[in-house]
Image (spheres, helix red, strand yellow):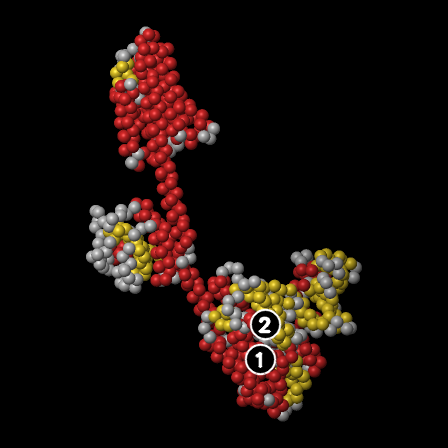
Amino acid sequence: MISCLIVDDEPYARQELADLLLQAGDLQIVGQCSNALEAMQAISKHKPDLLFLDIQMPRISGMELIAMLDPETMPRVVFVTAYDEFAVRAFDNHAFDYLLKPLDEKRLRQTLEKVRKDLRPKSLDVLMPQYLEHLPCFSANRLKIIAVKDVEYVFSDLSGIHVATAKEKVHTELTLKVLEEKTPLLRCHRQYLVAPSAIAEIEILETGAEVTTHSGAKVPVSRRFLKPLKQAFGFQ
Amino acid sequence: MSLILALTQQMCLYLVIVYLTSKTPLFKLFTENSTRLPHKIFIYLVFSAFCIMATYFGEQAHGAIANTRAMGAVLGGLLGGPATGFLVGLTGGLHRYTLGGFTDVACAVSTTMEGLSAGMINLYLRRHGKSELVFNPMVVGLVTFYAEMMQMCIILMIANPFEEALELVRQIAPPMLIVNSLGAASFMSMVRDQKTMFDKMSSTFSTKALKIAERSVGLLSKGFNEASSTQVAQIVIEETNVGAVAITDREKLMAFIGIGADHHLPGTPISSQITMDAIHQNKVMFADGVEFPYSCSISPNCKLGSSLVIPLRSDNEVIGTIKLYEPKNKLFLNINRTLGEGIARLLSNQILYGRFEQQQNLLTQAELKLLQAQVNPHFLFNALNTISAIIRRNPDKARQLLQQLSQFLRINLKRTTGMVSLGDELEHIESYLTIEKARFIDKLKVSIDIPQELYAVQVPAFTLQPIIENAVKHGTSHMMETGIITVKAIQQDNDLILEVTDNAGLYQPRSDSDGLGMNLVHKRIQNLYGDEYGVTVEYEPEVFTKVNIHLPNKV
């Protein structure tokens, strides 16, 4: 059985796709999500083989979503779109799988056959935005979209990944690795990333260093990451 | 007594000359209170000549000359200032000196003194900001009177022998005092009248021009057609009082008002040669009825006797003419000729502006048409996908949705950009929202709170729908929570305010094409109703966006 996840903000659109997929027989629908946040949670929870992803979604588009996924848990993606000239052109150019709404059963069957032959995820780098502009976060069960430029630092602990701005600390599903790659944040510690623009001062300590941000927060710097951090500011 | 008569006669001769000069443009120089050198030279020359002539025409009396020389010296001083007055007096005095007689020195000195003192008075009045008094005949008369008194004193003091001088003064003082004072006063009174006439004329002229401009503003900018031309012609004839006014385009008569309106019928082709010449040569044509005969090209019984044809231009291209006529029994006034050219310029500008505005309007209309024809493809395909999903479960509902979609598309495709009732616009919105609600089910709530009595209000088509579509597309569809859109209509005095509020608060002020829909609605409302109407936005990020559409309340 191929496990698959449907992500679309329109309930009927999800239902329609689910109906068609169930007819195929060898597909198991592990979840249906109505936005990118739910999708990230479901992907890290179910690790599906196949992702049916609508591009136009509230706040965080399908393209941004794949940029936020850890490459290790990236499933094979089939894009679904009602109308998006540019995306469709990109899909065609790189032979990515995509479906157009309203869904055509024949076309869906062809796509599924292709997927069954080779379930390995394709690299979607050409489609993804190079940098994220905003991060989907949670704060006490409330959804929050944090602009990357507002982030001072990010850290991980046992409860997960936390994003700190001058005003608050919120939880995110994004991994440190993705954040390091897709944002201007710099690694300063095994468990910390810091925004260079948020650094007010760096105090050199025996164990490494300590960054004070503009809002006054302290961020540890390990000896291993001190040198690259200093270099980022032009120190040798 | 005979001396008074003789001198008066002489003065009258002067006044006649002055009166005649007052009809020439040269005379305008007297009416100016200027301190420029050429003006002063002119004053000097004229009044020195005056003095010299006065001496020649003077009456021989007791070995001296009774004369009106003082007039020249005093007027020269009053109009030209101390230096000019002095020179005029000196010139007149030296001339008198060359003629000899026992008062030669006394006369030369006194005339110079007269000119100089009148000049000093001019200077005094100017310094005290009362230079207008120079033109007051009363003042001039008095000044001359005193100047003559002074002259008499000087004669008594200088001329020898004293007895003869005394006898002379006794003889000539009364006539010279009276005639010179009266003459100078009359002269100035003539200058003053001429001056007031000039001022009055130019002020009537400007008043007329301004009045025409004021009354006709905006008329032609709404379009150059028979109706607007007739209105303009009516205004022009009322303000200029000419016999008739006509406005033509390049081919035909657009409007004709006044004498001869019975056979100069709007809509008929242009028949007069001078109008065609004006159009083809882009030149003002004038048939004054005297040197250049004018005869009506339509009827031999036409009473019109002179005609001025001025081309109306738009971008250097002649687009028509305005014609002023006077009947055969009336002269074509120069003022109307100048005024006519001014009016033509004014009207040309208005037509040009109107065309520009019209083009702007057309552009907005075209953009709007494009916008409405451009059903958001994303919306359309998603709607079709939704319906295709619903068919499986609820064919009846799917059929309903298809009906709504068809209705939406039909209205979008065929509706003009004209006016519709608010009720019709709401119906269109209803079909749109039915589909959007089907797409998002419980994630989109819309409440429309518009009193039934406002349904008849006329609004420009596609005013509310694009704003609501924006609220969904850029607002609620980006919400993770339930999107709520409220639509309200508020009657405020004579205005109608439509409010569209969403709870997304994702509005971003920007000038690029993303706000195209809203911009177009705004631009069109402003074009239709003026700057006080249009679309405004209030918003609080992540909380709400409220779009206000401000319209006049028209049923």
Position above or below: B291 against B465? above
Image location (x, y in percent) of residue B354 = 40, 59
Image location (x, y in percent) of residue B18 = 29, 30
Identify the chain of the residue marked 2, using the numbered disc in the image. B
Image location (x, y in percent) of residue B387 = 56, 85
Q: Nearer the viewer, residue B99 or B435?
A: B99
Q: Nearer the viewer, residue A141 or A117?
A: A141
User: Which residue reaches farthest right?
Assistant: A206
At x 34%, y 29%, the residue is: B186
Secondary structure at numbered mark 1:
helix
Residue matched to label 1: B434
Residue A223 visible in this rendered orientation of the protein: no
Q: Nearer the viewer, mark 1 or mark 2?
A: 2
Q: Amino acid at mark 1?
A: Thr
Q: Amino acid at mark 2?
A: Pro
User: Position of A52 compared to B210: left or right?
Assistant: right
At x 29%, y 61%, the residue is: B253
